[in-house]
Image (cartoon, helix red, strand yellow):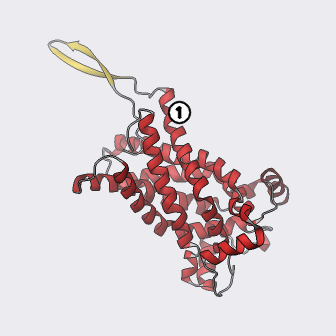
Amino acid sequence: MIGDISPPVTSIPVVEGNEELRKPQNLIPPFSKVVSHFGISGISVALATGVTHPLDVVKVRLQMQHVGQRGPLIGMTGIFLQLMKNEGRRSLYLGLTPALTRSVLYGGLRLGLYEPTKVSFDWAFGSTNVLVKIASGAFAGAFSTALTNPVEVVKVRLQMNPNAVPIAEVREIVSKEGIGALWKGVGPAMVRAAALTASQLATYDEAKRILVKRTSLEEGFHLHLCSSVVAGLVSTLITAPMDMIKTRLMLQQGSESTKTYRNGFHCGYKVVRKEGPLALYKGGFAIFARLGPQTMITFILCEKLRSLAGLHTM
């Protein structure tokens, strides 16, 4: 099961007449187990983010092409070569510091909250079917994003500005646009994170279950690899439009009266109207090229680290 931190339930005999009843104890997991659970989740996501970060920079540049107008798009390779020529190799790691910071916090919460949420739903509704898994992932993703959105805003701004410094960028955002600007795009970001986590974790969970049941695959590297590939593909198809809208909202600057987009729905409407429906999938291939490997690295690494820490498999 994904991120299982449910503690082992011990019991003591209670004698009533001639019957022996069993009484559950130690309902709260040990603190060390909780730390390991969330820590492993955060480390796994952070390492995967570090490997795939250049693709995230390329994705953001792709999404910001021809804002508000139609026109021929430069492909992923073209953007990559343009970055290398005009800004150098370091441009591929713009915003890496806030990206890693967010990965530890957001990734740890997103993966870590999935299983406890699923257990809570099971307790409340008596079921762990695919709908419960989707709901658990959606809650974990949305809640985690609401807390870590400021780091994401700073990361996206840095990816568009090669000369910016993280702390200085935060000060500039707060001084010029107010502290609320750190939560720009939080609505679409929460929707995207809910959809991403629900599709990614629920798909991985279900893919593992189905593959074990219907194929000869057993718990191990090949099962984790196949399940994570399926999860990466499904989550990309679902979240690409939301990711593009989130990026546009986070990068727009100015007062309320001069903003191009009022909210996520308005942004999506204007993009479709002025740039065409396919514009919602700008950077879509780059998203999969990043999210696919990131999903695989995250799950495979997390499974291995959990095994070494003596935790249940995901």
Q: How many marks?
A: 1
Place of residue 304 in the rendered image (x, y in percent of width and height, measured from the top left): 44, 42
- Depth check, front residue: 50 or 183: 50
Residue sitting at x 58%, y 55%: 51
Residue 263 in sight from this viewpoint: no
Look at the picture and state if 204 lies above or below 305. Answer: below
Q: How many residues crowd mark 1 within 10 Å: few (<14), some (14–19), many (20+)?
A: few
Look at the picture and state if 292 lies above or below 4. Answer: below
Look at the picture and state if 92 lies above or below 17. Answer: below
Where the N terminus falls, by quadrant?
Answer: top left
Question: Does residue 302 appear to the left or right of 222 in the view shown?
Answer: right
Question: Does residue 268 appear to the left or right of 151 in the view shown?
Answer: left
Residue sitting at x 68%, y 54%: 96
Place of residue 116 in the rendered image (x, y in percent of width and height, measured from the top left): 44, 40
- Depth check, front residue: 68 or 228: 228
Q: Which of the 4 quarters of the picture holds residue 181?
A: bottom right
Residue sitting at x 54%, y 81%: 278
Question: Does residue 124 appear to the left or right of 145 in the view shown?
Answer: left
Residue sitting at x 52%, y 48%: 110
Where the C terminus falls, by quadrant?
Answer: top left
Q: Which of the 4 quarters of the picture holds residue 105?
A: top right
Place of residue 268 in the rendered image (x, y in percent of width and height, measured from the top left): 59, 75
Instruction: Determine the residue located farthest toward the bottom in the rendered image.
Output: 71
Residue 297 in sight from this viewpoint: yes
Q: Amino acid at mark 1?
A: Val
Place of residue 146 in the rendered image (x, y in percent of width and height, measured from the top left): 61, 52
- Depth check, front residue: 103 or 127: 103
Q: Which residue is mark 1?
A: 35
Look at the picture and state if 312 lies above or below 246. Answer: above
SS for callout 1:
helix
